[in-house]
């Protein structure tokens, strides 16, 4: 195992000396505070308070507290009363909330309050003696410091407290603080956007190590972009590239740094670099572009933002609600273009309720259908990969079976569909679905596995026999890939044929070679995939109606329609958003 050691105090001393020559300033003041924790904390920092949400051993803690009090002999005890938190009745209503307020936790972190073990979390910086005492009460001595730092990160402690921990550790260890602890401290500084502290740690790390591991780089990039030394984040990004592909977060932060400093071209180039590496930006990164470009008059950049929207179209991505709001705000901020944005729903027919335009049809014309069919059969089915779980003999058997049947109207993934209702017997679900569809004179194909024909409680022989009577059935080996058979049978039957599965067929989509084919596939999928809406066993199965319009980012030049995900609405993977942003140019 690799261990990193750091001459922590020595580096600080060097830094301190360098800074002294720069004259007084905010940075130096902050630095002197930092410095004092490491060198004078014993004399000057006498605050000690200890909070024990779950006091297991009151005696020892009281002893600890009284020891601490008795050690304050020189009278600097002004804060003593406030610093001590007396034990609370633990299980009374509102206690956890109150406690977390006293500890200064963020409101949204209150729910994380631990109910499993005692936490020895100081509320003020401690001196070395005090830290020793806290450690005495902790069982696993060898992980104490890192555990403590992890708690501080979890509860977003003040960095002064974390600094006092490092100071104690450095004193004890000849000025050496290990890498992990330092990175913990950096995590805290970055999350609280303590930019000055980040730069100080950055200097230490830069002097001490030639390279870091990814977490260190990621934290430094995130911290540096808010400082005037943000360009150095780009150097760190280059350092990462020497070893590994940077993450979307690394790129996203560098882009944010460039945008914060109005370096639009740099931001754009980083974005293109990401796409070339096939890294999909986060929603936050997309949103940053629109937020920072708001009110900026730059027609080149305008075109680039429209390119982002087209990228979403080609990849069937739906903006989050906050991002949709940013898009709207940006459009409306373009001078002289008079864009007006509205949040709307689309009528079943595909007509926008705000501007009255018809959305793109989901229906594939015969040319598009043939194109897709050939592509899918070639790239997905004959690609080799999709059949890796089946045998050439079985492929042969399946193809011969399909040739012997008329085109189907509905293809059902039997195993997948029956799994949706775990409380209901599988064969009953399947029979209900099949009998309802065949009553409408539809030709149904059920794809299943051989084990479904074995007698069991879940697969009743009589019900399976009834299914086989009403529908065409193909039972594959128990290890076969269902999706490939499903796609083959459906596409081979023609443009009218639909299919029933809860699967999103993502793997297949990913196999497709280009944006155009992927979009066609997605349109075909939305227009042909049946989805259960409701099911009353023995009575009725209700399917969601298949959409007539294409749910995808679209434009006519003087209008944009952008489907987006609402904040509080959870969407299943096979569903599409129902909310749209309608943008139109006012003439
Ligand atoms: Zn509209």
Image (tube, rainbow, N blue to C red):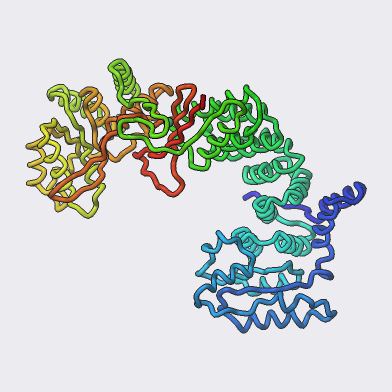
> Position of 120 compared to 206: left or right?
left
Say which of 191 and 352 sits in front. Answer: 352
**Residue at horizontal 54%, vertical 66%?**
113
Question: Residue 163 placed where, x, y %?
Answer: 74, 60
> Position of 29 compared to 504: left or right?
right
Name above or below for residue 110 compared with residue 226. below
* Quadrant of the picture in which ligand 1 is shown: top left
Question: Residue 449 placed where, x, y %?
Answer: 20, 39
Question: Residue 258 placed where, x, y %?
Answer: 68, 34
Question: Residue 547 placed where, x, y %?
Answer: 30, 33
> Position of 104 compared to 374: left or right?
right
**Residue at horizontal 37%, vertical 38%?**
576
Say which of 281 and 236 sits in front. Answer: 281
Q: Residue furthest top?
A: 367
Query: Would you say residue 548 is visible in this rendering?
Result: yes
> Position of 565 compared to 172: left or right?
left
Name above or below for residue 228 compared with residue 153. above
Say which of 34 and 144 sits in front. Answer: 34
Say which of 327 and 434 sits in front. Answer: 327
Q: In which image quadrant can residue 344 be found?
A: top left
Query: Would you say residue 245 is visible in this rendering?
Result: no
């Amino acid at each position: 195992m690799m261990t990193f050691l750091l001459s922590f105090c020595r580096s600080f001393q060097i830094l301190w000396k360098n800074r002294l020559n720069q004259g007084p300033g905010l940075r130096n003041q902050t630095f002197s505070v930092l410095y004092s924790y490491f060198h004078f904390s014993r004399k000057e920092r006498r605050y000690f308070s200890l909070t024990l949400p779950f006091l297991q051993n009151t005696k020892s803690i009281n002893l600890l507290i009284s020891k601490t009090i008795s050690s304050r002999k020189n009278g600097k005890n002004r804060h003593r009363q406030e610093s001590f938190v007396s034990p609370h009745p633990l299980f009374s209503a509102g206690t956890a909330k109150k406690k977390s307020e006293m500890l200064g936790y963020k409101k949204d972190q209150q729910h994380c309050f631990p109910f499993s073990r005692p936490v020895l979390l100081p509320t003020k910086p401690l001196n070395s003696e005090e830290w020793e005492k806290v450690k005495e009460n902790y069982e696993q001595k060898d992980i104490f410091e890192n555990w403590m730092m992890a708690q501080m990160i979890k509860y977003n402690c003040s960095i002064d407290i974390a600094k006092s921990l490092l100071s104690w550790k450095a004193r004890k260890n000849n000025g050496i603080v290990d890498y992990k602890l330092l990175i913990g401290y950096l995590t805290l500084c970055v999350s609280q956007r303590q930019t000055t502290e980040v730069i100080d740690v950055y200097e230490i790390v830069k002097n001490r190590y030639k390279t870091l591991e990814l977490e260190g780089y990621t934290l430094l990039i995130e911290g540096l972009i808010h400082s005037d030394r943000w360009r150095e984040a780009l150097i760190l990004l280059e350092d990462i590239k020497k070893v590994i592909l940077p993450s979307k977060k690394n790129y996203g932060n560098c882009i944010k740094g460039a945008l914060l400093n109005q370096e639009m071209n740099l931001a754009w180039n980083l974005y293109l670099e990401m796409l070339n590496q096939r890294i999909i930006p986060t929603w936050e990164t997309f949103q940053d572009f629109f937020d920072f470009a708001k009110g900026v008059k730059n027609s080149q950049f305008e075109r680039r933002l429209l390119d982002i929207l087209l990228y979403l179209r080609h990849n069937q991505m739906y903006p989050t609600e906050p991002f949709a709001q940013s898009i709207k705000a940006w459009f409306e901020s373009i001078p002289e273009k008079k864009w007006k944005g509205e949040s709307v729903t689309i009528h079943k027919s595909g007509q926008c309720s705000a501007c009255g335009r018809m959305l793109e049809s989901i229906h594939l014309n015969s040319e598009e259908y043939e194109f897709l069919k050939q592509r899918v059969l070639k790239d997905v089915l004959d690609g080799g990969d999709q059949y890796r779980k089946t045998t050439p003999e079985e492929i042969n058997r399946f193809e011969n079976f399909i040739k012997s049947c008329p085109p189907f109207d509905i293809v059902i993934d039997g195993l997948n569909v029956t799994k949706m209702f775990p409380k209901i017997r599988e064969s009953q679900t399947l029979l209900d679905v099949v009998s309802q569809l065949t009553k409408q004179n539809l030709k149904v194909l059920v794809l299943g596995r051989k084990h479904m024909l074995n007698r069991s409680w879940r697969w009743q022989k009589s019900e399976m026999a009834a299914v086989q009577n009403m529908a065409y059935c193909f039972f594959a080996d128990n290890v076969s890939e269902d999706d490939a058979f499903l796609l083959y049978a459906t596409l081979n039957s023609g443009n009218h044929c639909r299919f029933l599965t809860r699967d999103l067929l993502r793997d297949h989509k990913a196999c497709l070679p280009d944006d155009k084919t992927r979009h066609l596939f997605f349109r075909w999928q939305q227009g042909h995939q049946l989805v259960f809406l409701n099911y009353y066993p023995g009575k009725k199965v209700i399917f969601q109606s298949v959409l007539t319009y294409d749910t995808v980012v679209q434009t006519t030049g003087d209008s944009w329609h952008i489907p987006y995900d609402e904040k509080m609405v959870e969407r299943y993977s096979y569903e599409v958003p129902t909310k749209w942003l309608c943008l139109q140019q006012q003439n």
